[in-house]
Amino acid sequence: MKATLIIVPPGGGKYLYSLDFELPAIPQVGDYISVRRPGQEGTEDFIVRRNWWELQYPNLVGEGSGVGKVNFLLVECELAKGINSNPSHLAGYSDRQTFQEWSIDPTSPHE
């Protein structure tokens, strides 16, 4: 599914930038996403905060049935500090807000 990640600062606010992806599944609230770019050391890390759907329906109210479609899916993601974060990913924003850091429990099962 095609989705656009909308990147916001920690705590929310006006979006900083966006990234388009073709994804195998829809990210869920609380998911951690890491993006690796060619030639870049480390990752850009995010936490999914919410999904914004825009749907289109083919008929007006009372004009029969139909099947709607997805116009677009925006996945709002907050900057996060991951286990392999690229320092430049954090540098521009760390003085404004505190990043949520990933915590990994080695005893929890992984899927």
Image (cartoon, helix red, strand yellow):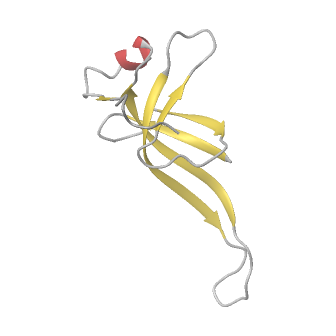
- The quarter holding residue 30 reads top left
Residue in the foreground of this view, choosing between 98 and 14: 98
Is 65 above or below relative to 27? below
Residue 11 as seen in the image, left or right of residue 49? left
Residue 11 as seen in the image, left or right of residue 79? left
Residue 19 as seen in the image, left or right of residue 90? right
Is 101 above or below relative to 39? below
Q: Residue at x 70, y 70 (%)?
A: 68
- The quarter holding residue 105 reads top left
- The quarter holding residue 63 reads bottom right
Q: How many marks?
A: 0
Q: Position of residue 6 (x, y in %)?
A: 50, 40
Is 53 above or below relative to 61? above
Residue 93 as seen in the image, left or right of residue 66? left
Q: Residue at x 25, y 20 (%)?
A: 95
Q: Position of residue 79 (x, y in %)?
A: 39, 31
Q: Position of residue 106 (x, y in %)?
A: 37, 28
Q: Residue at x 66, y 60 (%)?
A: 70
Residue in the foreground of this view, choosing between 38 and 92: 38
Q: Residue at x 73, y 84 (%)?
A: 65
